[in-house]
């Protein structure tokens, strides 16, 4: 396993004995850049050109084999759906041949799936206020990975249309040049695969639908994009994250700004009603779960302080 190479965050250094018949020509080192697809999380390995001539001797490889056998280095997916390892072999002249190998695991139905979701509104709770929203998610260890999440906010919370007029375009997002006004929060994701969390801003991004998408642009050792489609169902705002990568996540935290940068607006006094959101989860092994978590507002603490003041 090597460091950054050819713009990729990590690489492989493949050290191969160069033996041509009775001739031992030492070793050949071939580098392979390992890139992560930001949408699917799939690893794409691209090797440098294999040597055709070494020390004046023409090489004619007929077979290439690769074995990754370090314990714990490779993890199985948690989906038992048929998958494949895909690739392409290129000749020195540029001719290409597609390669594919079927891959499938079993035993997915025995994996636990018990995500824990928490939501909290902070800041002013009066009508027309712009509170901040904090969403927390915890996943059990060694369980099925999350494939889909749909979160429906409680009644009385809406998208302030006057602040949703300047989403980032797809071109600007791809270039890393989203305007400051399109940033609505930040996200942090912890995975046991990395020592440090992936962190990044959350943007409004233009879509073909009536409301813009929300996209968490997570950076760190690797880059991942978590895209949520925003719509309204039954007069309530819903964000749906589909096609989440089949990688283990231990914790996720998403914060939507409030105040002058807040996108959410209260249509009623939030302290006057018990708020509940609705969430549905689907695992990569197709197990589903629906919950209605309470949304904390901080009103309970203010009410308790007010009662204590009156009693004194």
Image: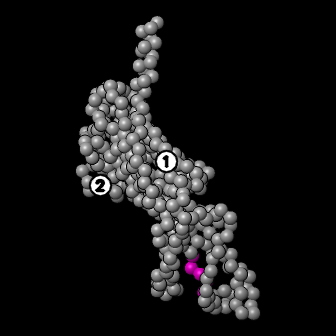
The x and y percentages for residue 179 are: 36, 47
Q: Is residue 311 above or below residue 1?
A: above
For the question of whether residue 50 can be seen, the reply is yes
- Name the main secondary structure of what is drawn in magenta: loop
Q: Residue furthest bottom?
A: 22
What residue is rendered at 43% in x and 27% in y?
Answer: 298
Seen at 42% across and 9% down, the residue is 310
Quadrant of the rendering where the N terminus is positioned:
bottom right
Q: Secondary structure at mark 1?
A: loop
Q: Which residue is at 49% across, 47% downward?
A: 115
Q: In the image, is 174 to the left or to the right of 70?
A: left
**Residue ID for mark 2:** 207
Numbered label tally:
2
Question: How far across and how far down the image is residue 117, in percent?
Answer: 46, 42
Of tags 1 and 2, the one toward the viewer is: 1
Classify 9 as above or below 265. Answer: below
Q: Is residue 219 visible?
A: no
Q: Position of residue 59 (x, y in %)?
A: 63, 89
Q: Classify residue 128 as left or right of residue 251.
A: left
**Distance CA(mark 1)–CA(mark 2):** 29 Å
Q: Of the residues under marks 1 and 2, which one precedes in the sequence?
A: 1
Q: Kindly identify which residue carries mark 1.
A: 115
Q: Nearer the viewer, residue 298 or 18?
A: 298
Q: Which residues are magenta?
A: 48-52
Determine whether, in the image, residue 70 is placed left or right of residue 98: right
Q: Nearer the viewer, residue 276 or 192?
A: 276
Q: Is residue 119 magenta?
A: no
Quadrant for residue 282, please give it: bottom left
């Amino acid at each position: 396993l090597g460091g950054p190479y050819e713009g990729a965050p990590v690489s492989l250094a493949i050290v191969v004995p160069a033996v041509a018949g009775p001739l031992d020509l030492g070793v050949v080192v071939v580098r392979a850049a390992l890139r992560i697809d930001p949408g699917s999380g799939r690893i794409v390995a691209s090797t440098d050109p294999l040597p055709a001539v070494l020390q004046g001797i023409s090489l004619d490889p007929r077979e290439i084999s690769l074995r990754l056998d370090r314990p714990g280095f490779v993890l199985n997916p948690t989906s038992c759906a048929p998958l494949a390892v895909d690739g392409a072999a290129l000749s020195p002249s540029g001719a290409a041949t597609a390669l594919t190998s079927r891959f499938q695991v079993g035993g997915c139905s025995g994996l636990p799936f018990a995500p824990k979701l928490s939501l909290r509104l902070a800041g002013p709770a009066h009508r027309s206020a712009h509170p901040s929203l904090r969403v927390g998610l915890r996943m059990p260890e060694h369980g099925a990975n999350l494939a889909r999440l749909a979160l429906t906010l409680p009644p009385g919370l809406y998208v302030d249309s006057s602040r949703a007029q300047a989403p980032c375009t797809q071109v600007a997002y791809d270039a890393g040049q989203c305007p400051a006004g399109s940033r609505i929060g930040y996200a942090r994701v912890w995975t046991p695969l990395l020592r440090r969390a992936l962190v990044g801003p959350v943007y409004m991004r233009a879509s073909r639908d009536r409301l813009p998408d929300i996209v968490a642009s997570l950076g760190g050792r690797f880059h991942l994009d978590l895209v949520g489609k925003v719509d309204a169902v039954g007069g309530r705002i819903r964000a749906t994250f589909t096609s989440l990568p089949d990688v283990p996540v231990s914790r996720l935290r998403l914060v939507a700004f409030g105040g002058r940068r807040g996108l959410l607006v209260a249509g009623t006094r939030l302290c006057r009603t018990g708020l509940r959101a609705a969430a549905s989860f689907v695992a990569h092994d197709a197990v589903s779960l629906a919950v209605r978590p309470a949304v904390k507002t901080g009103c309970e603490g203010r009410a308790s302080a007010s009662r204590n003041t009156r009693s004194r």
